[in-house]
């Protein structure tokens, strides 16, 4: 009985023959029967063959889809590269626009009437930079070859001023970063200014203490300066604290005459004391105010026409009959100056000194400001901790009071105009938008090595660039005859692949919600394909 059970477990599908024993009962004799032939073997083979053919078509379809996807990925990569190039161009344009806006803001915030602000900004950082206030009547221009900015080392802007009876003056404003390499800066300084044969003034914050003569790098810088024929005009400390006194701001020049006057100003506008140099140069001078008055020659169009008519009808016989050339010239100048002073006289005008007074600053606050300056001078003289603490406490207290008075002043103005929208906007514009005077924008723009000076053409150029960014990108995308989405076909819910062009060649039961129906045939794991 035990043997029959074991054989049944091993070979359940084989039919067992029935035999009768002596008692007439039927029993099973193991191992004595033959397996009956299966009738469905050919049908199973046919189904398996058709399933393999179906899988072959699916794999081929997936390969085609993958080729299309790879092609699409390459196109996307090319498009990203083009977009990156366009982004770089747009970034450069935005950087240029930001520079123009900053230039306009600098002229608006730091502009002075009658002066042009020439400056150089930092490359990769906000704030900082070097600059000049150049009088409009000076014949000045920027020297591009001597204007440079090196990150974390130095910033330098240079201008050249044309003089009448002397060599042109070259003036440079230099700032050395405190953490920059001193030896590299010294090498740059000697190479940059060594070939200049004109009158030279180099001013700025060098962050090299010239009073520390025992320092090797400082001595090397001083020796380089003297070897170039330059000498410092400032010899006293420009940055004072309770514990140190450093000479790090200076003006170097190669002009050895005694007509230069230099000095240090006592003011707390910065932690560095301002320095100055006065140089008597022969540029076109303007009539200076004397005792509150100034003199100006009146030259109108009518006056000049009258002068011409007077000179045409003038009797020059006295000049012609004179045999001595010098005497004839003196007579001519006397007659000419007489007519010139007659029609274009010099008149006296009262010089009006413009003072910018803040309306919220009272007389008591002005006296407090004077006391603050007095405390600062006392601190510079004594250089004690007590003097510094007293000065800083008074300065901070005064700053808070000034801000509070300014806030209260504008609050009262806004409260008084709360029913007047125009008045409110006038007040806000006076606070936010100061009137810019003398803003000098670039005179030309460059487009593909072409200089454009007409501002209408400049505006049209900007419009063309921004309008054509999208169409230019679209034109560089290669066109394909077939779409990748079309090759993918419809989604087949009964396979792990994306889709198939033909339905399966056998009936597939519909899956019920919430159940996981196994596939009707063994599906091998494909090496190429996208899983659902």
Image: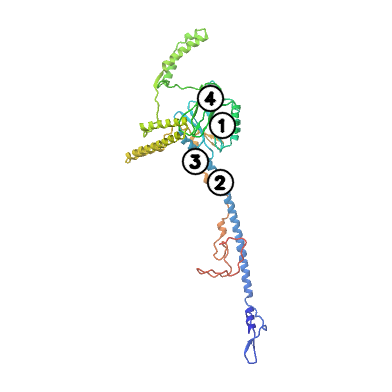
Specify the farthest residue to the bottom: 23
Name the quadrant of the N terminus.
bottom right
Judge the density around disc 2: few (<14), some (14-19), many (≥20) Cα neighbours within 10 Å.
few
Crowding near the residue tagged with mark 1, few <14, some 14–19, many ≥20 C-alpha atoms within 10 Å:
few
Which element carries disc 2, helix, strand or loop?
A: helix
Residue 170, image quadrant: top right
Measure how far apart labels 3 and 4 are at the Cα level: 40 Å
Q: Is residue 393 above or below residue 258?
A: below
Q: Quick one: label 4, few (<14), some, or many (20+) residues within 10 Å?
A: some
Q: Judging from the image, what secondary structure is the residue with disc 1 in? A: loop
Using the image as rendered, state which of residue 159 and residue 462 is in the foreground: 159
**Percent from the top left, x then y, of residue 388?**
45, 34
Disc 3 secondary structure class: helix
Q: Disc 4 versus disc 2: distance between alpha carbons?
A: 46 Å
Q: Name the residue under label 2.
A: 84
The spot of residue 38 in percent (x, y) is 64, 78
Question: Marks 1 and 4, Cα distance to the nearest angstrom?
Answer: 37 Å
Q: Which of marks 4 and 2 is nearer the N terminus?
A: 2
Q: Name the residue under label 4.
A: 162
Residue 204 shows up from this direction: no
Image point 60% across, 63% down: which residue? 58
For the point 45% across and 14% down, the residue is: 337
Which badge, 2 or 1, is on the more N-terminal residue?
A: 2
For image coordinates 62% across by 88% down, the residue present is: 26
Whether residue 254 is visible here, answered yes or no, is yes
Q: Which residue is drawn at 46% across and 22% down?
A: 286
Q: Position of residue 222 (x, y in %)?
A: 58, 29
Label 1 vs label 4, nearer the camera = 1
Q: Which mark is residue 212?
A: 1
The residue carrying mark 3 is 463
Residues under labels 2 and 1: Cα distance? 51 Å
């Amino acid at each position: 009985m035990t043997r029959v059970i074991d054989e049944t477990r091993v070979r359940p599908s084989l039919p067992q023959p029935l035999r009768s024993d002596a008692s007439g009962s039927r029993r099973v004799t193991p191992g004595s029967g033959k397996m009956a032939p299966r009738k469905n073997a050919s049908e199973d083979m046919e189904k398996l063959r058709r399933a393999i053919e179906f899988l072959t078509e699916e794999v081929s379809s997936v390969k085609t889809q993958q080729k299309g996807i790879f092609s699409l990925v390459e196109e996307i990569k090319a498009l990203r590269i083009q977009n990156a190039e366009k982004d770089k161009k747009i970034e450069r344009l935005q950087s240029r626009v930001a520079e123009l806006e900053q230039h306009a803001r600098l002229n608006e915030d730091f502009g002075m009437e009658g002066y042009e602000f020439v400056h150089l900004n930092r490359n990769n950082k906000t704030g900082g930079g070097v600059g000049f206030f150049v009088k409009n009547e000076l014949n000045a221009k920027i020297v591009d070859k001597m204007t440079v900015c090196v990150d974390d080392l130095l910033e330098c802007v240079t201008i050249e001023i044309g003089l009448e009876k002397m060599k042109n003056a070259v003036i440079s404003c230099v700032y050395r970063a405190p953490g920059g390499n001193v030896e590299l800066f010294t090498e740059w300084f000697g190479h940059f200014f060594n070939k200049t044969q004109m009158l030279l003034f180099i001013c700025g914050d060098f962050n090299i203490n010239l009073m520390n003569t025992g320092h090797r790098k400082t001595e090397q810088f001083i020796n380089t300066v003297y070897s170039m024929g330059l000498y410092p005009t400032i010899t006293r400390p420009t940055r004072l604290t309770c514990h140190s006194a450093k000479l790090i701001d200076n003006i170097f020049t190669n002009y050895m005459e005694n007509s230069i006057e230099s000095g240090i100003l006592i003011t707390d506008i910065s932690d560095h004391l301002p320095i100055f140099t006065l140089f008597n140069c022969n540029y076109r001078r303007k009539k200076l105010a004397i005792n509150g008055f100034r003199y100006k020659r009146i030259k109108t169009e009518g006056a000049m026409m009258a002068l011409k008519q007077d000179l045409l009808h003038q009797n020059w016989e006295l000049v012609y009959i004179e045999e001595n050339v010098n005497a004839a010239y003196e007579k001519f100048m006397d007659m000419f100056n007489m007519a010139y002073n007659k029609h274009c006289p010099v008149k006296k005008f009262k010089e009006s000194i413009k003072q910018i007074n803040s309306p919220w600053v009272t007389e008591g606050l002005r006296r407090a400001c004077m006391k603050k300056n007095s405390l600062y001078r006392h601190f510079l003289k004594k250089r004690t901790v007590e003097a510094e603490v007293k000065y800083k406490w008074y300065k901070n207290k005064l700053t808070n009071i000034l801000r509070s008075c300014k806030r209260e002043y504008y609050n009262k103005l806004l409260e008084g105009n709360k029913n007047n929208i125009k008045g409110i906007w006038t007040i806000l514009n006076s606070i936010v938008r100061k009137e810019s005077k003398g803003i000098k924008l670039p005179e030309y723009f460059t487009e593909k090595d072409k200089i454009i000076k007409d501002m209408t053409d400049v505006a049209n150029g900007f419009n063309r660039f921004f309008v054509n960014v999208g169409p230019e990108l679209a034109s560089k995308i290669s066109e394909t005859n077939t779409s990748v989405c079309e090759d993918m076909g419809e989604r087949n819910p009964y396979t792990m692949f994306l889709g198939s062009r033909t339905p399966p060649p056998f009936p597939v039961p519909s899956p019920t919600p919430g159940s996981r129906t196994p596939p009707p045939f063994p599906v091998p794991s494909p090496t190429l394909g996208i899983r659902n």
